[in-house]
Image (spheres, rainbow, N blue to C red):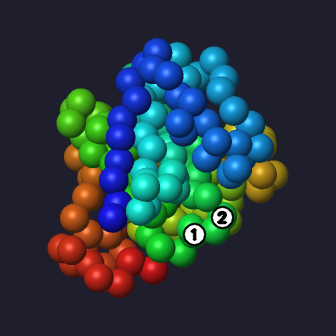
Amino acid sequence: MIEGKWYPQGSDLSTLLPVRQAVFGRGADALDQESWNVLVWQDSVPAATGRLWWRDGAFHIGDIGVVPSLRGQRIGDLTLRLLLFKAQSHFAREVRLRCARDLCGFFARLGFEETAGDSAQAAGEEVEMLLPGDKILLDGCAACKKENCPSRT
């Protein structure tokens, strides 16, 4: 069974920090105090996490990660959709994120597009992506335009 739990700003994150540590090699940081964090469990095992925060007129998504042994089961997709749902429920005008270039396809499936970037982005290290709030699509994927798409690859 898949379950999720939201952790608002200032919450005790001790349950989700082991997932962040396993995926990114780091624990808590200053951004946690201004972020909504989500933790997804699979069969009562912490499986994935991500966070959402508001800054400079936009929502930002970061640190979406799935425990390596549980990847390939669309848990990351669910985590991203939960974060987008939270942004949408707060009337997001836009959602931004930064990711490694090889992850662009994962985010593009839900409508994120690469923005004109800075020098680090031009060098290929990270990409900034943007999704306008009125383009948030939670019941399908941008690539196929089908509702409840069974083949999100």
Toward the front, the furthest residue is 44
Residue 147: tell me if it is visible.
yes
Q: Which residue is mark 2?
A: 68
Q: Is residue 141 above or below residue 11?
A: below
Query: Left of 96 or right of it: where is 86?
Result: left
* Residue located at (66% from left, 64% from top): 68
Q: Secondary structure at mark 1?
A: loop
The percent position of residue 46, horizontal first and vertical second, equals 51, 51
The percent position of residue 111, horizontal first and vertical second, equals 38, 60
C-alpha separation, residue under disc 2 versus residue under disc 1: 5 Å
Quadrant occupied by the C terminus: bottom left
Q: Amino acid at mark 1?
A: Arg
Q: Is residue 133 above or below residue 42?
A: above
Check if mark 2's residue and mark 1's residue have beta carbons within 8 Å.
yes
- The quadrant in which residue 5 appears is top left
* Residue located at (63% from left, 18% from top): 30
* Residue located at (25% from left, 58% from top): 138
Q: Is residue 85 above or below residue 150?
A: above
Could you classify mark 1 by the number of other residues whose Cα lies within 10 Å: few (under 14), some (14-19), or many (20 or more)? few
Which of the two residues, 81 or 24, is positioned nearer the viewer here?
24
Toward the bottom, the furthest residue is 151
Q: Is residue 79 above or below residue 59?
A: below
Q: Amino acid at mark 2?
A: Pro
The percent position of residue 152, horizontal first and vertical second, equals 38, 77
Q: Which residue is mark 1?
A: 71
Residue 115: tell me if it is visible.
no
The percent position of residue 149, horizontal first and vertical second, equals 26, 78
Q: Secondary structure at mark 2?
A: helix
Which of the two residues, 33 or 59, is positioned nearer the viewer here?
33
Could you classify mark 2 by the number of other residues whose Cα lies within 10 Å: few (under 14), some (14-19), or many (20 or more)? few
* Residue located at (55% from left, 23% from top): 32
